[in-house]
Every structure is written in structure tokens, then in C-alpha cells.
Image: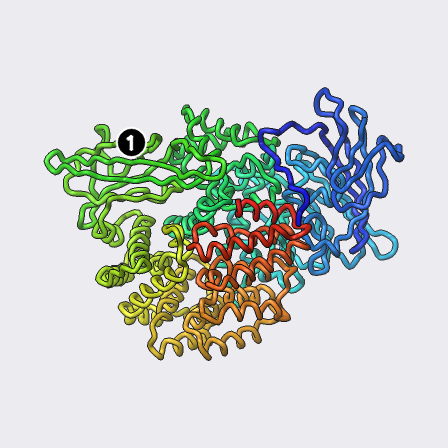
Amino acid sequence: MRTETPQPIRLSDYRPPAYLVDDVHLTFDLQPNTTRVKARLTVRRNGDHSEPLAFNGERLKAVSVAIDGRVLGDGEYVIDAELLTIPAPPAAFTLETEVEIDPENNKALEGLYMSGGRFCTQCEAEGFRKITFWPDRPDVLSRFTVRIEADRRFRHLLANGNLVETGELPGGRHFAVWNDPFLKPCYLFALVAGELDVLEDKLVTKSGRTVDLRIYVDPGMAPRAAYAMDALKRSMTWDEEAYGREYDLDLFMIVAVRDFNFGAMENKGLNIFNSSLLLADPATATDVDYERIEAVVAHEYFHNWTGNRITCRDWFQLCLKEGLTVFREQGFCADMRGEAVQRIKAVKVLRMRQFSEDQGPLAHPVRPSSYMKIDNFYTATIYEKGSEVIGMLKTLIGADAFRKGMDLYFDRHDGEATTVEAFIQCFAEASGRDLGDFFAWYEQAGTPRITLSATYDEAARTLELVLTQATPPSNGQETKRPLPIPVTLGLLDHEGRTLAFERDGQAMDETVIVLDQPEVKVTLTGVDSLPVVSALRGFSAPVVMKTDAEPKERYVQLAADPDLFNRWEAGQDLAADLILSRAAGKPNEVGEERYAEAVGRALNDQASDNAFKALLLALPAETDLALMRSPVDPGALHDAREALRLRLALHLDAELRRLHTGLQDLGEFSPDAAGAGRRALRNAALELMAANPRNDVADIALGHFRAAVNMTDQIGGLNALMLIGGPAFEEALADFYARWKDEPLVIDKWFALQGRDPSETALGRILGLTAHPAFDQKNPNRLRALVSSFANFNPVRFHDPSGAGYRFLADQIIAVDGFNPMTAARLVDPLGGWRRLKPELGALMKAQLERIVAVEGLSKNVYELATRALN
């Protein structure tokens, strides 16, 4: 049992750093178990005070401490488990320290550790304190010079910035010296040393500078980095065109590592990537992998300006770099792969991850006011909702003012560690608008609920719209303020044609209504017929919206809404109503048949592209449906959703078979949007066919699997066979493993697919897989593949009535917390929804949280999230 309660860190307690470090020289003598790190820091007091110097340091074996060349003796400094404290240092001085660390046994994967026989680092958020003594906070900006010494078998010695010197050393060793001319916080420090292959290219910037591009990977894997290199070049050019941001060093490097707690890290000039988000070829990577690689490469590159050149004053401002960079990433992906499809995918992720977060005990504002471990706040609220907030800002002030605000932000704050307030102020100045009320989006947790009702006056040709908003209470925020919510809106007639209208005397066919009070009324004039209201187009705000629209109006939107997001949304709304009605014991079979007919017509719409049709075929996820009911009966939701899947499969049988046959890849594989869309629709058709009990469907799925010439189709076939079950699935599963057992990233897919198996025997299979020779609990990719897939994407088995699913997850959290608290904490979230479940399930889930909290020696990471989930 824990005997001490970790204390929170609060935004209100922020104070500027007592000491600044202007320059640092680091020397690494790399040894797997006894790496020596020498640090020479130019330190000065920040302001007029007499505080002791207190630099962070954890798991460091101190060798020496000196000031201005004099070694300090006992009594002149104190080192405990977390700090180096010097009671009375000079106002300005040189601090020299030497420490010893053990990278090989660093299984937490923070600081300097070894992966695949190579040295690498991860310093965000607080990993640098595990390398050397340092004021480990993002508002201490320094210029780094780094010397790396290592055995010759560690062929490449890499760090941030520019390579300034290399040479040989006695005993078969060598060295490299790197200098980064830009000020940066220590969380952006990076070092990699090892045997690596490199893919090289060049890019000429808009000003005519040539930048060398290098991607370092496992030996033999360089060809699989080709798509990442292409994505990097496209993202660099896009940032120049869209934001006027040019790369600033002569060299940009990316390194792929096997063991990584994050997806990727934006270290200045030396990005470090999880291999799963960098390596791809058609045989081993799916279209989803290609799309994620494109997005994450762009995201980390865009951080060069939104995160690196301008960074966060403190970790409470995390959304300032992450939400903003997700917004920029989404803009890039929309231009690469189609705006509507990418918007739908982004909203699906937002609802699955962030809306769930907002409805549970882990709800927090986009800018939190307190935390125990900042690692726990790399959340969907910070990233995805943070992006949505910036999208609303752009909608409210307009694209031109938004670009002016971004330019002002870059010009004013380059080289600084700044705040969200300073960011918003730039847009207030650029637009000439008071954005004080908008800031509530950063300070208030929860998903607003808005309602829209419409009253049409045929004689007056007017439409009165009444919009209301309310945000449910959340932890520490019982009373919520009204928020400025932009609602983009258009009208259709009942034949699906666009209806023009007037607002305040101006003719238009689309408008933005700003709902900034508890209730707002708007009257549109010149409306020629009873309209269908197409509201919240493009999902113009991260809200839950309810309207008084009847199903027949949703069918008009599904067939003809010019806003493709709302066309998809109409289908999702119709399907959700049917599933929830059946789950409540009130099936609407006539409505289900009508819905199947409408989906069939949508599939035959020649104006829609394949990627969009694939999204139309997918029913709302059980996790999304669970947010619409309380208490939740996961089993009833699953059964009701499966019933609608069966209805669709039977009604659309001929059309699904036609699509499956007609969309087969016959030419050379291309990862572009058109090729990916074709494969997405073909595999979506097969997945829906798998709900059909006809005997030949298993044969079709097995044939699809065996004939596949790319990983997308292999996984598509295997997924359909999983949903069908039986001998064909077991045979394909064994064949897949035998073929790919030497490819770690592919075997991750094998584990992940089984984690999602909804069959009644799945839990036993998953428990057995934890003893499989290929399962490695210490590898975050492998752990996430099996355990996270099960807990997050297999609700019917995770919520097993026996509680075995909850017990399995708690066992994994407790075990992993012993060596990697950051990864363990990321497994806690699925246990946070116990209050929304029907009581008998909620009690079982709560019991596992209580078991976790009672563990002796539990990390701060897991303790914070588990206690918040309980309280």
C-alpha cells in the first residue's frame, strides 16, 4: 500500500526559473552499462534572489561536482533521489558535473537507453534529468554542444544540429562533435549511436538553400524508408507554401528505433521515430500504415516551428505545441488525401478518444490547471481537442486573419518559451477582435451539448432557428460558462437541392452562426420551401448536437448533402438510432430495411469516391454508441449492432460481391489516395459480407487472404475470417504467423488483430498469447498491439460479465508499472468508465482500480490516473 500521496503541480504556482543555462557542453563516453556523462554548464542567476540552486537528477550515480573548476566537497552540495542542491552558488558561474548511468538496463525508455543494440534517447517530458543534472523545465533555453565517444561498432554518432568534427580515438573508438546553434529546452535533446543504414536525399528550399535529408534505419531496411522520405519532402514544401516556414538547418535527420514509448519525437534536427511509424513497403505495411507515416512525419517536421523554434513556457501549455501541430498536420493530410475523407477520419478519432475522455473521471481542460505527472497529459484532449479549438478560431476570424495571426506569432515569439495567452493575443491583434471569451475553450473541460430547433413560416418564407448550449459538470468544474461555438449551416430542399436564403439582408447558401450565449435565435429570410437544415457542416465545433430533424430529413442529407461530412454524419445518426433502439428492446425492422436501401443507393453514387463510400459502409463503433447511453450494457449494444450489420449484409449481398470482385488490385501497388480508397472500399465490402451466414462467404474471405499481393488485403482477408471464425480463420492465422514471424512490425498486426477478436473464446486466446514466445511485455509496440487493442477496441470481450477482461488489464498495468510507468499509465484509461456501465459491471471494474491503487510502490504515473478514475 502506498504510504505517501504525490502532490500536484499547479499552473497557479508557476515561477520563472531561478537559474538559467546559456550554454552547455556535454561529453558522452558511451558504454552499455557504465556510460559517463560530463556536463559543463554556463549558469547565471535569473533575477535578484538568493535561492539555492536545485537541478533535477534521477537515477544518476554522481562522480563529481565542481564550480569554476573547483571540485566541491562534502557539505557544499546535496544529492538526493531527485535533486542536486547547491545552497549558495555565485551569481554567474560554470558548473561541471560528471555522472554514470546504465542505458542497457533502462527499461523505462526515458533518458538514455538501448534499443536493438543501439543507444538512443527520449527526453520529453522529463527524461533529460535521467542523463545529467539540469533544470528540467521547458523555459530554460540553451545552446548545446555535444561530444559523443563510442566503440567503432556504434558506427553513426548523432545529435542535434550541425556536425562540426569527427575523429578516431585509441582502442578502436571514435568521436563526433555536434553543435546546435538554436536555443532549445532540454526535452528536445537527442542522441543516437549505433549500426544503422541510411537513406539520403536533398531538398532545395524556397530561398534556394540545399538541405541534406537522412533517414537512419535498421540494416537492410533503407528501402522501406522511401515513403517516409517522400512524405518529409512534401511536408517541408507544404509548410513553406501554407505557412511561409522554411527549414533552418543544413541537415535534417530521422532515426527509427524499435523500443519507444511514443509514436515519434520532434527533437531539433534529429527526429526519433518508433519504427512502426516510419518503415513501409506494400508487402509489410497497410494503407493505414502509409497514411499514418505521412501524417506523423509531417507532424514532427511541423514541430520545427510550432514546438521547437517556439516552445512552451511550462508543461501546462502543452497544447500550444501539440494541438497547434495536429491542426497543421490535419491541413497537410487534407491537401494530400482529400478534405472530406480526412475530416471524417479526424472526427472519428476525436469522438472515440476525446469525447470518451470528456465523459469520464479523466476529463480535463485543453490547458490543465494541475498534474502529478505531465506524462499523463499527452491526451486526446491536448492533441485532438486542442486542434479543434484552433480550427474554430480560424472559422471565427476567417482564413486571412488567421494567417496574419500565425505570421505575427512566428515573428514575435521566435526563440521563446511562451504561453497560450500570448498565442491568442496574436490573433486578437491580427483580426481586431476581442477573443477574451474564446479563451474559455482552453480552461473548461467537457463536451458542450447543443440543440437546434427550426420553425418554418411558409407565408413569410422565413426560418427561425433556436440554438442552445450546455456543458455537463466535470471534476472541479460544476458550473460551466457559455462558449463561442461556430455552427456552419446550410439548407436543402426535400429533393436534396441547395436552398439559397438571406441573413441580415445578404444572400447566401451557407452561414456561420456563433452560439455564444446559453440560447441564440437567428431568422433566415427568403427561404422558398420547407427546408432540411444541414447544421454543423464540416464538424465546425467539437460538440454533441441534437436537432428536431425527422429521419426523412436525414435520408435527404445522406443522399444529397453537398457537405460530405454531413452526408456521412446523417448515415451515422440513422444507424445509431436504429442500434440504440434495438439495444433498448424496441427494434425498428422497417427502419433498418430503409436504412439498408439508402446505403445501397449511396454505394451506387458515381459522384462519391471509394474512400468516402468505405466510410459510409462502417456502422458507428460500439465505443461511440456507449457514449450515447447511460448506464451502458456493452453486450446489448454489441448484439444490436451485429443485427444491423447482418441486415446490411443480406440486403446488399449482390452489391457487396460486385464491389469485392470489381475493385481487386490488378496493377502495381500505389499508396496514393486513389489506390488506398479502392482497397478500403473492397475490404469494407468484405468485412460487411462476413456478417452474412452464407456458407461461401468464408471461402471468399480465405480466397481474398490467399490471393493478396499486399499487406492491406492480407489483413483485410484475415480480419473478415476472424469475424466469421472457424477452421478457415485458424488456418489463415497460422499461415500468417509462419510467413511473417521474422518481421516484428507485421507480427504486431497479428497480435492486434487477435486482441480485437469478438468471439466467445477470444479472452482465453488473448490470455494464452501473453505466454507466446513472440510476446514481449517490455516492448511498448508489442504490448499495445495485444493489450491496448483488447481493452480499447474489443468492448464485448473486455466487458465480459465475469470481470475477467478487467482483471487481465489490471494484471498487465501492475506488471508493466514495475519497469515502464509511462506505458503502464496509458493502459489505465479503459478502466475509467466504470460509472457509465450497468452496476454489476461497474462494480467489477471499480474493484480492479482499487486493486491497482493498493499496490505497494506504485508509480506516480499510474497512481494519478487510477485515483482520478476512482474519485
Between residue 528 and residue 795, name the one nearer to us.
Answer: 795
| Residue 106 appears in the picture as rendered | yes
Q: Residue furthest left?
A: 459
Task: Categorize mark 1 by other alpha carbons within 10 Å: few (<14), some (14-19), many (20+).
Answer: some
Left or right position of 263 against 83 = left
Left or right position of 806 against 537 = right
SS at mark 1 in the image: strand
Say which quarter of the image contains residue 584. Answer: bottom left
Left or right position of 625 against 567 = right
- Image position of 415 with respect to 252: above or below: above
| Residue 336 appears in the picture as rendered | no
Residue 545 image offset from top left, x and y in percent: 33, 43
Residue 497 image offset from top left, x and y in percent: 20, 47
Residue 500 image offset from top left, x and y in percent: 20, 39
Residue 604 image offset from top left, x and y in percent: 27, 62
The chosen color scheme is rainbow
Between residue 194 and residue 242, name the one nearer to us.
Answer: 194
Residue in the image at 34% along x and 36% along y: 469
- Image position of 442 with respect to 351: above or below: above
Task: Report the number of discs.
Answer: 1
- Image position of 702 with respect to 192: above or below: below
Say which quarter of the image contains residue 130. Answer: top right
- Disc 1: which residue: 520
Residue in the image at 43% along x and 76% along y: 702
Q: Residue furthest top?
A: 48
Between residue 311 and residue 688, name the one nearer to us.
Answer: 688
The residue type indicated by label 1 comes to: Val
